[in-house]
Image (tube, grey):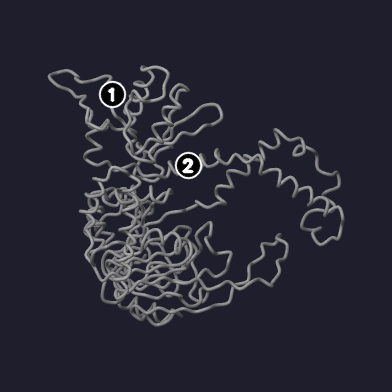
């Protein structure tokens, strides 16, 4: 990008003149209907009927300040004051059950909406806006000071950890130079009107790591994040939709947001993110609002969105994301190939040869033919598809999804108590010229449990049983391979027993192994891997 100074206000004015979007109105909301875009044909797909039912306009859920009292009563909140994040995380650390910890943190995130009603009425269905009029609500999660600290102290690389972007005159550009992103260059980009997107801030911020590692247990899916810092009067990204559920957390300043319905049924809950759209392709917004610090905006995957800064203030927001590639279709993508493989092994009907002349009446070029052989062929396919369900290894496919999830997961952030009572606090040490307190620590009466509800899972590959776990994962996404080790046959039942016993502590002696030696051996292995901790420090 040419290093030519352009004021932020000039960039903002230019963008407004070129944009076909409505005039900015603070906290305004517009609901409009639009025609459904005709589905494009891909060249080989049979023609579809043009008589399709019109999609109903998906609603929005807005909570304004004057409605807060009613909502607070629903979420059992005493008044408008809410616990600061630092105090909340300290309190959560005192909660023994990690599932309960995750539930409480998520409730804080979307307060004052009850989480039960959120997942029933809003999740994957419609946007929701929470305007709190409390600029300190998310204070401590992340800040521009933290952004600057990370640039100075960490090895931030352009294109890997940081993107420099702009969107002017309807054109979206990325301006990443090669190499490390140092403050001298990064802040120069910012002063010239470029937005900064920090990817995976959890790798550098212990607070973001802590929050996401807890939330991933609530979602049962990876919880990720990006941080966006936008100069006054500018816009960094073109209108687009994402393939994730997005929670936009406004941390500093203000940002003007516009959210649009999916353009067609084909774009509802999409599998992949969209390309950049022009303003003429997206119609009118169903929600238009200025987010201020402390506000939250949620929208499902498929909802087009764009955000721009007001002329007088910067914007810093963090987007928490989840549920990428976590649909029924994604599960079936694992179920169906395995089911077909099993069916072909066990049922001769799946192995019988195709008709000698099937190419003469089947295929797209023959799709308009009125041929009884087509009817018979399709009937045979339909029958085989019905039989295929009986061979579906659903549990095995779910385990494959779980392995993917465990690979995505952040490692847990351990509390002081968990550190002291786990392998990290074991007394083994170097003292007076020798290693002391080394060796077997577990006894039959030692009380143990998993260190987190979802930290480990038993999976079978058909020949052996493996225990997958997240304790040794990296804070950098997929930096490490999935972590697992083989469980001995004599330890399988005891490992399952321990998983299902959570959150209760159980004695090593109560593990269902044949011998006391096996019980102590299994507990020792799990302790060494950081998967269990003891009721009292060893």
Q: Position of residue 55 (x, y in %)?
A: 58, 71
Q: Quadrant of the C terminus?
A: top left
Identify the residue at horizontal 51%, vertical 27% (top origin).
464
Quadrant housing residue 56: bottom right
Circle 1 crowding by C-alpha within 10 Å: few under 14, some 14–19, many from 20: few
Does residue 213 lie above or below 489 as drawn?
Answer: below
Q: Position of residue 469 (x, y in %)?
A: 40, 36
For the residue labelled by badge 2, is the local secondary structure a helix, a strand or a loop? helix
113 on left or right of 92: right
Q: Quadrant of the N terminus?
A: bottom left
Discs 2/1, front: 1
Quadrant housing residue 491: top left
96 on left or right of 172: left
Q: Which residue is mark 2?
A: 402
Identify the residue at horizontal 64%, vertical 67% (top origin).
40
Quadrant housing residue 514: top left
Q: Between residue 401 and residue 110, name the one nearer to us.
A: 110
Does residue 322 lie above or below 296 as drawn?
Answer: above
451 on left or right of 34: left
Q: Which residue is mark 1?
A: 445
Q: Position of residue 316 (x, y in %)?
A: 29, 64
């Amino acid at each position: 990008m040419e290093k030519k100074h352009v004021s932020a206000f000039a960039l903002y004015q230019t963008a407004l003149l070129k944009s076909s979007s409505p005039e900015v109105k603070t906290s305004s909301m517009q609901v409009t209907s639009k025609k459904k875009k005709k589905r494009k044909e891909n060249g080989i797909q049979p023609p579809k009927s043009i008589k399709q039912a019109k999609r109903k306009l998906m609603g929005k859920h807005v909570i304004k300040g004057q409605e807060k009292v009613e909502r607070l009563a629903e979420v059992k909140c005493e008044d408008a004051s809410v616990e600061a994040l630092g105090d909340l995380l300290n309190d959560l650390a005192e909660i023994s059950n990690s599932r309960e910890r995750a539930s409480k943190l998520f409730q804080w995130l979307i307060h004052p909406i009850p989480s039960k009603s959120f997942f029933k009425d809003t999740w994957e269905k419609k946007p929701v806006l929470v305007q709190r009029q409390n600029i300190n609500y998310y204070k401590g999660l992340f800040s521009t000071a933290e952004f600057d600290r990370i640039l100075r102290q960490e090895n931030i690389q352009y294109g890997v950890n940081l993107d420099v972007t702009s969107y002017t005159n309807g054109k979206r550009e990325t301006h990443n130079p090669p190499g490390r992103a140092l403050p001298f260059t990064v802040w120069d980009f910012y002063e010239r009107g470029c937005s900064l997107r920090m990817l995976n801030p959890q790798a550098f911020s212990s607070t973001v790591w802590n929050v996401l590692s807890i939330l991933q247990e609530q979602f049962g899916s990876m919880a990720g994040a990006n941080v966006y810092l936008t100069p006054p009067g500018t816009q960094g990204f073109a209108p687009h939709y994402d393939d994730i559920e997005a929670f936009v957390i406004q941390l500093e300043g203000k940002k003007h947001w516009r959210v649009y319905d999916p353009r067609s049924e084909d774009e509802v809950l999409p599998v992949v993110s969209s390309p950049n759209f022009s303003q003429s392709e997206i119609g009118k917004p169903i929600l238009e609002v200025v987010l201020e610090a402390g506000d939250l905006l949620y929208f499902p995957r498929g909802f087009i969105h764009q955000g721009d800064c007001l002329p007088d203030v910067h914007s810093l927001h963090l987007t928490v994301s989840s549920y990428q590639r976590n649909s029924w279709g994604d599960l079936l993508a694992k179920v169906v190939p395995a089911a077909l493989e099993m069916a072909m092994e066990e049922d001769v009907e799946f192995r019988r040869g195709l008709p000698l002349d099937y190419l003469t009446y089947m295929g797209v070029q023959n799709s308009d033919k009125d041929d009884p052989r087509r009817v018979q062929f399709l009937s045979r396919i339909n029958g085989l598809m019905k039989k295929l369900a009986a061979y579906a290894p659903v549990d095995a496919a779910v385990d494959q999804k779980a392995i993917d999830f465990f690979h995505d997961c952040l490692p847990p952030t351990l509390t002081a108590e968990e550190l002291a009572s786990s392998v990290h606090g074991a007394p083994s040490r170097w003292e007076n010229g020798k290693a002391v307190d080394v060796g077997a620590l577990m006894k039959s009466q030692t009380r143990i449990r998993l260190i987190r509800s979802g930290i480990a899972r038993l999976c079978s590959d058909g020949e052996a049983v493996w225990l997958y776990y997240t304790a040794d994962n990296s804070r950098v996404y997929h930096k490490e391979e999935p972590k697992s080790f083989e469980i001995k046959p004599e330890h399988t039942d005891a490992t399952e027993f321990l998983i299902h016993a959570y959150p209760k502590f159980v004695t090593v002696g109560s593990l269902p192994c044949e011998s006391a030696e096996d019980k102590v051996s299994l507990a020792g292995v799990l302790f060494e891997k950081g998967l269990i901790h003891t009721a009292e420090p060893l």
